[in-house]
Image (tube, rainbow, N blue to C red):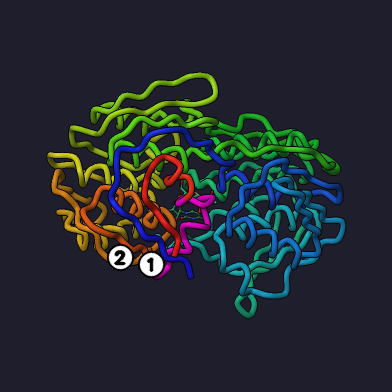
Amino acid sequence: MAIFEVEPGAPLMGEAVIHPAKNAALPVIAASLLTADTLVVPDMPDLTDVQSMCELLVACGATVERDGASMALSARQLTPPASAAMMRWTRASALIMGPMLARLGYARITMPGGCAIGQRPIDLHLKGMAALGAEVTTRQGFIELHGTLRGAVVYLDLPSVGATENIMMAATLADGVTRIENAAKEPEVVDLAHCLNAMGALVHGAGTATIVVRGVESLHGATHQPIPDRIEAGTLCCAAAAAGGNILLRNARPEQMRALLFKLQESGTTVSEFPGGLRIRGKAKWPMEIRTLSYPGFPTDMQAPMMVVACVTPGTSVFLETIFENRFMHVPELIRMGASIRVEDRVAVIEGGYRLQGADVRCPDLRSGAALLLAGLTADGITRVEDGAGHIDRGYVRLEETLSALGAKVRRL
Ligand code: UD1
């Protein structure tokens, strides 16, 4: 069981190299099920969510070969996994539905797991598959989908990232043209479209609200590198804005981080961009108003790390969480550290500028865990992030090492 110990330290200095994104890697792993050939990912991030997803693929009959950071995924054989348990490890397990249905005409999944940040239904995924011609039934805790897929117009009530990705993958092998309307525009959706097109798919419009997929007979192997992690980069930006510092983030893509960087600049930090990365300097000075939204709005995954910045910045900040209904689970832990935060429904009001106090805190979910590590950097005394701190390894590659390389005092016990 992972426990992280954080001591307050000097402002952060130096450089970090941003890893490939979890949220780009997981759908690419699922996409490998669309072909009997090999999909190669040259640099796969070393994350427990990636391991869970790979174990699920192996349970579907695929082979996963690692050579250093490189990973080769081959699904010559494909069968629905027998066990429901491994689908509860990661939310992204739902992403095997589209590829499996498209390739076999049959898929069987269970309700996926992942962070308990809200109800996280998959109704939009299922409605999409039904629109493409699948018959959806529930039996003994499993959701079963049958049918030969035909292109169709699919309107999403919400621009769900996972539903857009799942439907996009299913549509690559459907008969005819699919239009996904009100599609998610996240960079990871665009990255998946690039991967699918490298495999021979015909996907257009990813990154806009309408994605058009022209179905093809079959897909082939390819090599695809998932994009750098804008959430890891953003978390490090928040670390610098909370603790002070001057750090260079290589591989960061500022053009995919506009909403966050704009807010950090508005609150008094200096951000400079250059080809291949960004630099952030200084400590936040002024309070902020944050409303989480779908891309290109402020990412819900950045809400917890940004709240730590608000806690240590003088003035009243207001956060509105519009994406997930249960995403303030870091708040009681921050209060345990001396933060002044009031939550009413989906609004958090933070009276910032007080010094946080180190404490033993529990890690309720992935992004909250990262936020609590950042809080520890700014607190007096020692902070121990325990009870679920393994969540952090689901989405950050050895975050304690990345922060330590920037001069922070963070240890894994
Ligand atoms: C993805 C990201 C996650 C991020 C989230 C929002 C991955 C692996 N995870 O999660 O880090 O926090 O996007 O940016 O990429 N919804 C429904 N019905 C559905 C699907 C979603 O009501 O069928 C709702 C959800 O409950 C939530 C909202 O839509 O309120 C957004 O969810 P969605 O975009 O699907 O998030 P994920 O793909 O699960």
Q: Residue 373's x, y, as percent?
A: 35, 53
Q: Residue 333's x, y, as percent?
A: 26, 62
Q: Which amino acid does label 2 sit on?
A: Val
Q: Residue at x 61, y 52 (%)?
A: 46
Q: 159 or 93, which lies in front?
A: 93
- How many tags in the picture? 2
Mark 2 neighbour class, 10 Å CA radius: few under 14, some 14 to 19, many 20 or more:
many
Mark 1 neighbour class, 10 Å CA radius: few under 14, some 14 to 19, many 20 or more:
many
- Where is 368 relative to 255, above or below? below
Of the two numbered discs 2 and 1 on the same chain, state the one appearing first in sequence: 2
Q: In this view, does 24 lie to the left or right of 338?
A: right
Q: 229 or 23, which lies in front?
A: 229
Q: Is residue 33 left or right of residue 17?
A: right
Give the spatial CA distance, label 2 vs label 1.
6 Å
| Image: magenta residue range | 387-400
Badge 2 residue CB within 8 Å of ligand 1: no
- Where is 136 relative to 402, above or below? below
Q: Mark 2 points at which residue?
A: 361
User: What kind of element bears circle 1?
Assistant: strand
Q: Is residue 369 left or right of residue 165?
A: left
397 drawn magenta: yes
User: What kind of element bears circle 2?
Assistant: strand
Residue, far bottom: 140
- Where is 145 relative to 379, above or below? below
Give yes or no for contact between labels 2 and 1 (Cβ–Cβ under 8 Å).
yes
Q: Residue 411's x, y, as percent?
A: 42, 57
Q: Is residue 383 left or right of residue 221?
A: left
293 drawn magenta: no
Q: Mark 1 points at which residue?
A: 386
Quarter of the image where the C terminus is located: bottom left
Q: Which residue is drawn at 80% across and 39% down?
A: 222
